[in-house]
Structure formats: C-alpha cells, structure tokens
Amino acid sequence: MAANRAFQIIKGKPIEMPVSKEVVTVENAIEYSAEEKVVGTWTDGRPIYRKSWFDISYNSSGTLGIYIGVQDLNIDQVLSIKTARRVAGTTNNGYSQSSNAFVYYSGQDLKGTKISGVSTVSAGTYIHITIEYTKKESVQTQDNYVAYEETSTDTEKA
C-alpha cells in the first residue's frame, strides 16, 4: 500500500480513503485562545482560523448573557462551532436540561437558543464557545482601503 493512501475494511472489502498531507500536532489540535489563531488549511487552500470565548452565561431560554459580535473577523464560512457547558445538577428524566441549549452563527454574531419545542433549559455557563472559520478574501482598492469579496457557499443556501 502506498504511503499517502489509507485503506479501511468495510464488510470484507478494502475501501480507499484520502489522507491529508498536513501533520496535525497536539498543540494546534487542542489550543483554545481568546486570540484569533491559524490552525490549519481548508480544502481550497485558505487558512482555517480558530477563536474562543470563555465563561459565557446563558439563561433558561438559551440566550447568551452577552453579545458576541464577530463582524471584525471577516468570516466567509463557519466550519465548526464547539461548546462545553456547565450547569447546576438539574435533570429531566436523567438528561441534563442544558443539553437542549446550543450556539449558532447568525450573520455577524453568535447567538444562543434552545431546541424548538423545548419550553425551558437550565441556565448555566458555556465553559468555552469556539469557532473555526475561513475569512473573506481581501482586495486592495485604489485608495488603500481593504474590501472583502463576497463568496457564496452551498452551506449558505441550505
């Protein structure tokens, strides 16, 4: 088998899987920072950025306790949003009521809410909210102002 290919056996048949040439180190795989960091390369060659917010409270409607605006990050495409929550020991049939709260990207900010049909969640705190994203490509104008090209993706149309 070639060094740049991997195979997985599924139902007795080898299935070839693509392998990234990029080496992922433990340091960039788990580094969470309030500062924007480049953590990898997207499939189109653009850098992947990561930024985190820490100890963000949310209420029983899932709404975040503070406004998190991200317009200064010039986000083109959000690739992932990761969160970890801390909540008082309230449960509903053995499940934490906060498991119905989530964070999403809406235009130029991050928002919190609860799953549709759930009347309330237990208020708590996000230990961290972390997003990974690509940026809009900058274009230098005649007056030395930086403009950002709008790009559309299939995920924005969904």
Image (cartoon, helix red, strand yellow):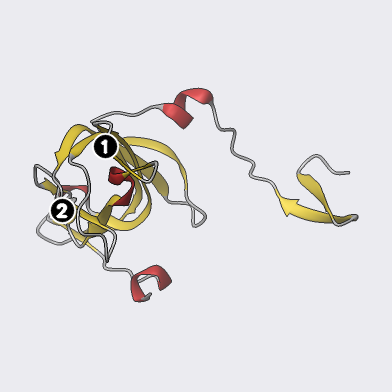
Q: Earlier in the sequence, mark 2 or mark 1?
A: 2
Q: Which residue is mark 1?
A: 90
Label 2 neighbour load within 10 Å: few <14, some 14-19, many 20+? some
Amino acid of disc 1 = Thr
Q: Is residue 55 left or right of residue 91?
A: left
- Looking at the rendered structure, the secondary structure element under dot 2 is loop
Q: Give the residue furthest to the bottom.
A: 157
Foreground residue, 62 or 26?
A: 62
Few, some or many residues within 10 Å of mark 1 (<14, 14–19, 20+): some
Would you say 62 lies left or right of 49 here?
A: left
Q: Residue at x 80, y 48 (%)?
A: 8
Instruction: Tell which residue pokes out farthest to the front in this image.
Output: 93
Query: The disc labelled 2 sits on which kind of residue?
Result: Ser
Disc number placed over residue 138 in the picture, else none: none
Q: Secondary structure at mark 1?
A: loop
- Residue 117: x, y in percent? 27, 66
Of the 4 image quadrants, the one containing the C terminus is bottom left
Q: Residue at x 47, y 31 (%)?
A: 29
Residue in the foreground of this view, choosing between 99 and 54: 99
Residue 154, given in percent of the width and then of the height, sits at 42, 72
Picture coordinates of residue 37, whole percent (x, y): 33, 34
- Determine which quarter of the picture holds residue 82: top left
Q: Is residue 54 left or right of residue 76?
A: left
Count of marks overlaid on the render = 2
Quadrant containing the N terminus is top right
Left or right of 65 on screen, residue 24 = right
* Residue 11: x %, y % from top left: 86, 57
- The reply to whether discs 2 and 1 touch (Cβ–Cβ < 8 Å) is no
Residue under label 2, please give it. 61
Nearest to the observer: residue 56 or residue 25? 56
How far is disc 2 from disc 1 in space, using C-alphas?
A: 15 Å
Discs 2/1, front: 1
